[in-house]
Structure formats: C-alpha cells, structure tokens
Amino acid sequence: MRRLPLVVVVLFLTGALHAQTLGPVDWIFLVDTSKSMRGIGGTKDIWTDVKVSLDAFVKEAGEQDTLTLYAFDRDVREINAASRSDLYRAILTLDAEGTRTHLGAAIAKGLDHAESLRLARADSTRRQVVVLFTDGKQDVRGIENPVSIDSSVDRVGESFVYFVSMGDHELQLDEFAAHAERAEVMRAPTPEAIRNIAREIRAKIPPPKKPEPTRAPPPSQRPPSPPPAPKPSRLATLLKVAIPLALLALIAYVVLQQHRRKNRLEGELEILRPRAAPDAAFVGLPKLQVSEIALSAILPIEALAGSDARLFVRRNGDRKKVWIAAQSGSLRINEVETPLSELYDADTIEIGDAKVRFNRVGDDRPLESNQESEL
C-alpha cells in the first residue's frame, strides 16, 4: 500500500505532461458515406473499420477537446450530437448510402468550421484538426456548381488537415498536400491501418507554440528595483514545494479511485461456447475491477479464431452502460452483425467460434431495440 501514492503521482504527472504537450484540440471529422465504403460496386467493405477508428478518436479525446462530425456524398451534412454519448450512437447508426463523392465541398465545409472555431476562441494553444476519410475519387456527376478540391488550398491557414485515403486514391489530394504546409495524405489500405489511424494522427500533431516573451524596457525606462527580499531557509523552501505536491498526490489518488469505481464494468459473461467447466462458465465483470477489457483476456484464444472485441463502459448521465466494439473479425449481437453495440441483459455475443451471454439483471433491452434485433 505504501507504493500506491507514488504510482498515482507518476500517473497524474504523466497525464498532465501529455495534456500540456498536445493541448486542447478541435477535431473535425469528414466521413465519406458513399455506397463504395460498404463494398458496393466491387470495392472493399471498410465501413466497420472506419466506425471503429472514429470510436477511437472520440474515446481518446481530451476533456477540453471538441468533436464535430460531418457526413458527405453528394452534399455535406453535419451529424448533430448534444454529448459524446450521443456522438457514439450517431457513429453506430451512420449509414453509407450515397451515390457521389463531393470531396471539394467536404474539405471547404471542414475548413469553414475550423476557421469559425479559431476566430471564436482566439486561443493560440488550441489547434483545429480536420480529418477526412474516403475510399474514392472526386465524383460530382450531375451536381450543379461543384466545389473543386484545389479551391481550398489557400484556406488551410493555421489548421491541420489529414486526408485518410483507404481505396481508389484521388491524386488531387496529393497536389493539395504539396501546396498546403499543414496538409498531409495518409494511406490506409488495410483494416488494421484504418483502425490505427487515430493514434498515428495524434502522434503527428506538434505541440502548440509557446507565446513569445515580452521584451523588457530599456534601462532608462525601468522602475527602480526594490530592495532584495530576505532569502528563505532551506527547510521553508522544501516545505513550500513538498506540501502542495503531497496535497496534489492525495487529491489525485482519491479522484482516481472514485473514477475507477464509478466506471468499472458491471454484469456477468456466461460462456456458452466452447463448453467450460461449471466453475469457469461464469465470469463476474465487477471482480475484474476494470473499465474495459478485451474478450481475448477472458476467452480461450483458439476459440476467437483470430477475432477480438473489447467491452467498455459509457455513462449517460447517472446511468452506467456496458458497450462492446469489434477490434477484428465479425461481431454478432443477438445474431445481428454490428461493429459497435450497447449490451443489455441476456444479449448473446458471437465472435470467431465463441459464444457468450451477457447477464445484467434489471437492464432489459428496450422493446424497440428487441424488435430491431429481430429484424
């Protein structure tokens, strides 16, 4: 127990250093919702991987970050979400049914929003980052007055722009990045690359510039220096530093423990396949004392057959909900394939060759959700 405060201090200071290094970010996502993202027309179906990547962006966003989601095909439309919980649901239910790919309009809309946020906040430590996901080329057939891609090159300004190209590559994006200092094309040809794109983009964003120090006036204009203050003793200096650090460590420890207890997984997993011994067929999630865990840490690796998914907690006000997201392979909830789903009592989970039942008494699936699952 004596080592716990030291560990908490290290974790607290590491997190604080990371926040200071990256600083607050206004994330603006532009997602191609043309049918080709689902594999219609002979392309690869990457829609699930894109949703998982967006989920990672939202999950890893800092408390001071903002997140805005736009969908585009023929036109560009904002996906309104009042909270991050609503944004998770919006990502889960987002469809790809469009017939065109209006990249120029999407880029213009993203830069418009980035500029409006920059002017409204006037905070040099905040960065505006535009991330565009697409698997195709600009296709504006039948669209009146289409917006060209290169028309927005001069509007990048202080924003950072990342084009995530996941399929038939649009060469105009390379030309855009060549002429805009803070724009870059990132190729993500595989599902694994798409899912890891959030981490790669975060690593590329440089720390914010420190404000320039004010210059001291010339000696003739400086006020007379006050007499030097008496030098404090070494003990007083040590106490002045040690007491705030001790209080900070105590506060961090208490907050961290409360946060962990508040967001621990609840419910129970009942292993239906492969057959398990009676004393090993039920896994109580509260005993794990974690807020998220991969199924590969619970089930036999061979039963997953190369697939995996993670269980995690999301809060909706005072309500704690348990969710599951596919990491690799096909995930089926109540025999319906899905990349991301909220779990309710008696829901069945199938992944690879494994099948488990999620039990959480009192958290019954709403009637509408049951009907949707049956459909």
Image (tube, rainbow, N blue to C red):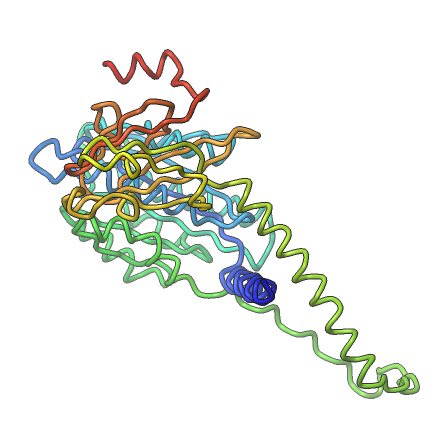
Residue 51 versus residue 354: which sits nearer the camera? 354
24 or 276, nearer to the observer: 276
Where is residue 331 shown, x and y percent of the image? 22, 34
Q: Quadrant of the N terminus?
A: bottom right
Whole-percent x, y for residue 9 in the image: 59, 65
Pick the residue in front: 358 or 61.
358
- Give the side of residue 140 with respect to residue 161, left or right: left
- Quarter occupied by the C terminus: top left
Q: Answer yes or no: is residue 136 visible.
A: no
Q: What residue is rendered at 27% in x and 34% in y?
A: 278
Q: Residue at x 24, y 42 (%)?
A: 49
Kindly identify the residue that appears in the image at 53 percent across and 28 percent down.
319
Q: Residue furthest left?
A: 42
Q: Quadrant of residue 205?
A: bottom left
Residue located 34% across and 44% down the image: 107
x and y, in percent, of residue 137 in the image: 18, 43
Please tell me how many numbered marks the rendered image carries.
Answer: 0
User: To which quarter of the image does residue 102 belong?
Assistant: top left
Is 370 drawn above or below residue 60 in the view shown?
above
Q: Where residue 58 sits in the image (x, y, percent)?
A: 42, 43
Answer above or below: position of 65 versus 8: above
- Residue 294 visible? The answer is yes
Residue 368 placement: quadrant: top left
Q: Furthest-right residue in view?
A: 227
